[in-house]
Image (cartoon, helix red, strand yellow):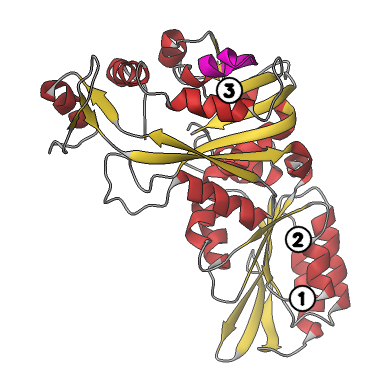
């Protein structure tokens, strides 16, 4: 994980005395705002983007939590955690440039802007100095999450130089050693005070999202995970609740030898729901309803499908559970049934659609969100009772 220190600061100042990246990004952002409008730059770092946004005629508040970066910023920065701004200023745009998980940025935008959220993400896959790292690019991650949440966005592209300029080979060696790279990559000659360049063509994606299209996380007490059988929905629930030490309530269903079993989370209730694929209301109307009524701090419903399509007492209990204040994670089959639609479309539900293509990204982004979101009840419930969790980025 990146950390600010005198060396990284000196190299960033060296690079952005020449690199027009932040100027070009700021110019594209300014196309979406009239001159004089207000902007908060979240996690502003050394303030290069804030400075360029100000040069575009915007009124900029730069917010940086790291004391060293805030002190060395080239633009006046407010030293604060962006979550703790008090009183909350309402701005025309919140800019999150390489800052935060997608859900964290969305949650912040609900509190801090009446207009737009702009997330700036690189399209470079893996680490920019480790091209063989096969991890998806930050832009792909952002787009995947927005699509899985069904949130409309506008994406624009800005070509950028993603490399680094150097004074000489010793300067370059020192830089790459700081990133754990001990074999110097090829460098290109260039004009100016830093005549060597590690050239890396890249593109910045700018995602513009209207506040009206962002969920109000304060009221989203139920995370609904929808997907086909075997896609990884239960695995996602397990990853989200790793280390949770509070009291769980709710139920689990498991398929074995052609039969489906239902049990309460505390293990006090269990039984055979029926043969897979059949409509079998009896066990759901008894065990399922009792399980949903048991006490606990975090509710799990894994999973809701078509076997209970005629279990009307159970359906009423599920809708009642989704409607209350208790943080809940509900796993739902990807089926077009009235009961499942009521759960997915409920005003308290935050629906995430899981697929084979997006499941790894969605899982990791939701895990990041659980650690970083301050308002979303599901994240607060898990983090409050989890061991070894931190809200630091």
Up/down of 297 relative to 302, above or below:
above
Marks 1/2: CA distance?
29 Å
Q: Is residue 91 visible?
A: yes
Please identify the quarter of the rendering in which residue 295 is found. Answer: bottom right
Please identify the quarter of the rendering in which residue 5 is found. Answer: top left
Q: Nearer the viewer, residue 322 or 354?
A: 354
Q: Earlier in the sequence, mark 2 or mark 3?
A: 3
Image point (41%, 13%), residue name: 68
Q: Nearer the viewer, residue 3 or 214?
A: 214
Q: Which residue is mark 1?
A: 336
Up/down of 358 relative to 1, above or below:
below
Judge depth for marks 2 and 3 and give the one in front: 3
| Farthest residue, direction front | 191
Percent across and percent down for residue 365 are 53, 49
Q: Which mark is residue 294?
A: 2
Q: Nearer the viewer, residue 119 or 206?
A: 206
Up/down of 72 relative to 340, above or below:
above
Q: Which residue is mark 3?
A: 41
Image point (56%, 31%), residue name: 96
């Amino acid at each position: 994980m990146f950390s600010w220190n005198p060396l990284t600061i000196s190299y960033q100042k060296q690079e952005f005395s020449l690199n027009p990246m932040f100027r070009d990004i700021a110019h594209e952002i300014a196309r979406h705002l009239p001159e004089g409008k207000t902007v908060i730059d979240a996690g502003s770092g050394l303030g290069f983007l804030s400075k360029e946004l100000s040069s575009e005629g915007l009124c900029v508040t730069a917010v940086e939590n790291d004391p060293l970066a805030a002190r060395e910023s080239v633009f006046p920065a407010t030293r604060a955690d962006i979550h703790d701004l008090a009183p909350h200023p309402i701005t025309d745009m919140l800019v999150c440039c390489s800052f935060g998980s997608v859900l964290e940025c969305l949650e912040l935008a609900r509190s801090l802007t009446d207009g737009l959220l702009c997330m700036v993400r690189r399209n470079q896959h893996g680490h920019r100095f480790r091209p063989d790292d096969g991890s998806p690019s930050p832009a792909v991650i952002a787009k995947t999450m927005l699509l899985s949440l069904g949130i409309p966005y506008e994406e624009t592209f800005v070509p950028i130089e993603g490399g680094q300029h150097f004074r000489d080979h010793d300067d370059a060696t020192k830089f790459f050693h700081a990133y754990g790279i001990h074999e110097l990559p090829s460098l290109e000659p260039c004009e100016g005070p830093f005549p060597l360049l590690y050239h890396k063509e890249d593109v910045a994606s700018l995602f513009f999202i209207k506040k009206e299209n962002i969920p109000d996380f304060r009221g989203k007490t139920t995370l609904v995970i929808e997907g086909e059988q075997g896609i990884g929905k239960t695995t996602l629930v397990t990853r989200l609740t790793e280390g949770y030490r509070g009291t769980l309530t709710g139920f689990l269903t498991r398929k074995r030898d052609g039969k489906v079993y239902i049990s309460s989370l505390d293990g006090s209730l269990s039984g055979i729901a029926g043969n897979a694929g059949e409509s079998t209301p009896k066990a759901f109307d008894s065990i399922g309803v009792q399980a949903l009524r048991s006490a606990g701090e975090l509710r799990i419903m894994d999973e809701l499908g078509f076997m209970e399509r005629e279990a009307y007492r159970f359906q009423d209990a599920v809708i009642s559970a989704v409607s209350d204040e208790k943080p809940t994670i509900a796993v739902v089959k990807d089926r077009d049934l009235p009961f499942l639609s009521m759960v997915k479309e409920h005003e308290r539900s935050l629906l995430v659609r899981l697929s084979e293509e997006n499941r790894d990204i969605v899982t990791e982004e939701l895990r990041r969100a659980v650690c970083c979101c301050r308002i979303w009840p599901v994240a607060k419930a898990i983090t409050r009772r989890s061991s070894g969790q931190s809200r630091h980025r």
